[in-house]
Amino acid sequence: MNAPWSAGMPGNRDPFAAYICDDTALDILRPVIIEMGWQPEKCNKGGLRNAVQSLSVAASPNILMVDLSESGDPLNDINALAEVCEPGTVVVAIGQVNDVRLYRDLLASGIHDYLLKPLSAGQLRDALNQAQTVFAAPKGADQETAKRHISTAVVGTRGGVGASMIATSLAWLFSDDHKLPTALLDLDVHFGTGALALDLEPGRGLTDAIDNPSRIDGLFIERAMIRANDNLAILSAEAPINAPLMTDGSAFVQLEEEFRQAFEMTMIDLPRNMLINFPHLLADVNVVVLATEMTLASARDTIRLLSWLKTNAAHARPIIVANKVQSGAVEINKADFEASIERSIDFQIPYDPKSATNAAKLGQVFADANPGAKSSQVLRQLAERIIGTSDEDADEEADKKKGSLLGGFDFKSLLKKKEPAEKAPAEM
Ligand SMILES: Nc1ncnc2c1ncn2[C@@H]1O[C@H](COP(=O)(O)OP(=O)(O)OP(=O)(O)O)[C@@H](O)[C@H]1O
Ligand SMILES: [Mg+2]
């Protein structure tokens, strides 16, 4: 039984009902229920068995209090209750067995709280107020997970370093390997290769968006984006090269906003000149992949871009990816490159012209066309790092929220084993 009452929508239900075994407990409960503004008649005599019988033929209340005192096997009997109880009900159990293991098992099975007899008015009041808070709160963890969004921009430190190859491969891996709804936005408006790499026509979607930013909404996104697979949609253009880009960048920001609602992952192929013209494009980006080669010019511009990011987008996590790496044939070796940029390279993708040619021939993105290649393996690790990094952020956020909701008692976090914060960078 996996907390069937922790999800779902409340309908037209009673705010409260209780099924209690003995009169002493009922006498303490009723005045508290009146105080809470609920009907004392909803405090029924009879414990768990009575609750199961009644709820099998009636709607479940928002908050259900149930006495386990007469139950020989409370955990098993709770399962029977779960079968007749509608989703969304917050269940507070009462019992006379003072056993931490039972308490934990009950919480793990989806029970909100377990109160030990003899009851006191204060204890009941606290528990019911808390149950009410939980009931009224947005149905937490599941929706938070569904709404999680990671926005990644790939920027090349120089032209031709492979930024678009990395952006399209990552978008493919998010959408295909990880089945995450993904938007790929190719902001190389005149010379973009996002659609080309996927063997698709770019269409007019991005051009229309730039011309009429006010038209951008959920419906526009649905109509204008080109589907590459079940989970991947792309927005790109092959704008005529006699038409200069006429935009203040608001269309791009609006698109990012819509993607956040409609997808779980956004991948932006962001040419360096766009970053200069529209720095606000990075305002809500979580991860910036700096694609680089091990050359002198690339080292200089990695330093400049890292410094720019620190000043203008400190919230975004930079990941340095050296591409087209050939051992013994790089302009600057790894140690010198890292010394000059004053940080380590996170991933190195080998120079792999065979795979590049194969991708072009097949009309597939690099990682899709060459799943067994070493270069694709590094791309898969990079995809995992991006997804994983933000998982950790989201977990921390969720833990903070859950902790405050349950008044400091966060049962699940006790059980959860945290992963180490950072994985070792992939080595060739
Ligand atoms: N690891 C690699 N090994 C061999 N060839 C590669 C590798 N990565 C990319 N390429 C090839 O390099 C060329 C340039 O790649 P890509 O278009 O992705 O670079 P870019 O940085 O986006 O360029 P631009 O500055 O024009 O946007 C492509 O032909 C691509 O197939
Ligand atoms: Mg490119």
Image: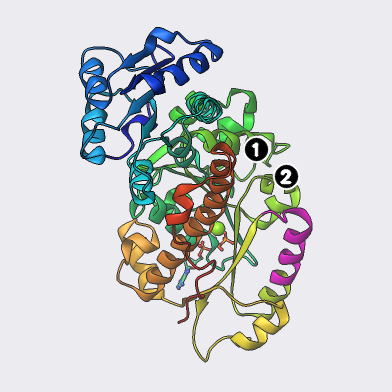
Q: Amino acid under label 1?
A: Val
The residue at the far right in this view is 311
Residue 332: mark: none
Image location of residue 285, percent across then percent down: 62, 49
- The dot on residue 253 is 1
Q: In terms of depth relative to the viewer, which is nearer, 142 or 403?
A: 403
What colour scheme has been applied to the protein in the rendered image?
Answer: rainbow
Circle count: 2
| Magenta stretch encompasses residue 309 | yes
- Identify residue for label 2: 280
Residue 50 shows up from this direction: yes
Ligand 2 - quadrant of the structure image: bottom right
| Neighbours of disc 1 within 10 Å: few (<14), some (14-19), many (20+) | some
The residue segment tinted magenta is 302-315
Judge by depth and name the residue closer to the eye, 109 or 53. 53
Give residue 56's position: percent from left, percent from top.
Answer: 21, 18
The amino acid type found where label 2 is placed reads His
Above-or-below relation of 116 to 356: above
